Image: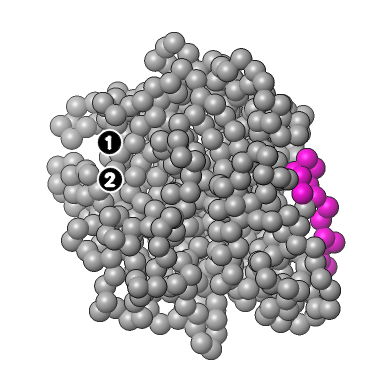
Amino acid sequence: MTTPPPPPPPPADTGPEPDSGPVDSGTDSGPVDSGPVDAGPPPGVPDRYCPGGEGCPDEGDGVLYVGAAALTVTPTIGPTTDVQTVDTNGDGEFNPADGDEFDDRNGNGTFDGVWIAGFGNGRAASGVNDDQWARAIALRNGATTLVLVSIDCVGYFKDQMDLIRDALADEDIDYVSVTATHTHEARDTLGIWGVDVGQTGIDPDYMVFLRERTVRAVRDAVAALEPANVQYARFRVADLEGGTRRFVGDARDPYIIDDEFRMMRFVAAGTDTTIATLLNWASHPEYTGDRNQLLSSDYPHWLREGIENGVAGPDGMPVEGVGGIAVFYQGALGAQIGPASDVRLQRFDGTPVETDQREAAETAGTQLAYHALAALRGDGVVSDETAALGFRTRSFFVDVQNRGYHIAFVTGLFQREAYNWDPERALIPGRNEPDILTEVSVIDIGRAQIITIPGELDPALFVGGYDGGYTPEDRPVVDTTLENPPDLSMAPEPPYLRDLAREDAEMVLLFGLTQDMLGYMVPEFDYELDATAPYIEEAPGDHYEETNSVGIDGWPTIRRQIEGLLAWRPGDGS
């Protein structure tokens, strides 16, 4: 068992101490006999904000500066990397009981593979299909500087993100935000996809390499800052030929998909030369499938390539890219939004393309790039010479109620700090179970506002959509013939998260898996646990997501914090 760290002091320059857990939780979320815990300031009061906050004066010339950088973070598969040589049943997973074999290239008798995250255990990479990246957009206006980072990985814990921030302490940066694209074809960065369920998939050397490359990308982006103008564009996938399900589906009712594709293109001031294009859409990057053993960024690779370098259109003629550096930020992909079984992916000529193969990722990414380029050059583009910047951020504790996650903490599979519990004592739900420190933020860029969520948010929690407005026309919001369907009469009324954005925000973006990775965020009215083995076994019906969430109080805790942060304004107290 591990020894718990002492409760942390407030992080440097982050303001008030984080919350101790869910509201009205008493002492149940802390260690046994721990006594009352200072609840800290009310939910939503930021630890830090700019401009106008401490150390972040509201001053400057009003000019927007933007820089971007991209560095590969692809793991090395070399002469000493163990790879699977025999996959008896072709399932893409190493299992000696099936007769599978591996090449012990380092001669230590152990399969030391490059373990791919997502799907099942034992997926050892045998090569590289396309690179994984750390990509960063740096923005400065007046005295406010922030950097938005996107890493091609399945998820990235707050603890690791804070190490990136620590390494950048010498830079003139007010805030660094880190998003994971959630690709299911990259190396394990969370620890639960090793050769089997009891062994980590983490390689400490790779985690250092990933951090150092990300830090370098941020530094390069800041060093490249130059005066810039900004363009805003968006489109709905539902409005394209073939509709939403040509690209993406929903594996869980209510069948609600945030299908809006949102973009910001930053160009050198007074020119049409692209510095960076910010891309925001929601779908699991798992189109290549669970049998794939080649490292990949999945569809974001083809999307970014198309935006930068161009694609072939429906008629086969080339469509020019916009250049610069394209950076993809994942959206609200909870409920397993992605290449579900009812997706009707097809080539431009109408030929069907089956998912679970590399062509599926290429088709989805390339076609999305084509439509994004059309939107960037269409009538709906709005251009501004500058964009005001701002952010407010809040750290707080979340109670981890998931018993599977408890095991991951005790065994060291989760390599992050846990607080307010005693691992030497019995795990008692509600009395001795760990808290983790997480973070949410609200980021303003001109006409746009970004809401960050530390996990996989069900899109219904962002857009609502219970009226069918975000459901394909040929599919009901709820299929009542399925077992244990959600009861829409219990669904919440508006306003939903997007509705709480600032009134003058013309575009609201949701960055999922940002600042942390806490698993799925499930609507409260549809949160179902198995009666005998909660969090370990699924409740009847489609309730996998509950088994991969921090707990039943997780989303309500996060929701209170982000709603408070959205409502907060300078002068409300700190």
Residue 501 higher or lower than 253, as above or below:
above
Q: Which amino acid lies under the numbered mark 2 shown in the image of this protein?
A: Val
Q: Residue placed farthest to the bottom in the image? A: 532
Q: Is residue 537 above or below residue 142?
A: below
Residue for point 58% across, 59% down: 560
Q: Residue at x 47, y 53 (%)?
A: 497
Note whether 204 is above or below 401 in the view shown.
above
Is residue 448 inside the magenta stretch?
A: no
Answer with the quarter of the image where residue 31 lies: bottom right
Amino acid bearing label 1: His
Which is closer to the viewer, label 1 or label 2?
2
Q: Nearer the viewer, residue 358 or 287?
A: 287
Which circle's residue, 1 or 2, is located before the other in the chain? Answer: 2
Q: CA distance from mark 1 to mark 2?
A: 9 Å
| Quadrant occupied by the N terminus | bottom right
Residue 316 shows in this picture: yes
Question: Residue 514 location, x and y as percent?
Answer: 56, 48
Task: Find disc 2 in the rendering and name its residue.
Answer: 237
Label 1 close to label 2 by CB (< 8 Å): yes
Residue 314 percent location from the top left of the image: 18, 35
Count residues near mark 1 (Cα–Cα under 10 Å), then give few for <14, some for 14-19, many for 20+.
some
Predominant secondary structure in magenta? loop
Start-end of magenta stretch: 2-16
Where, by quadrant of the figure, is residue 86 drawn?
Answer: bottom left
The tag on residue 371 is 1
Q: Residue at x 40, y 62 (%)?
A: 493
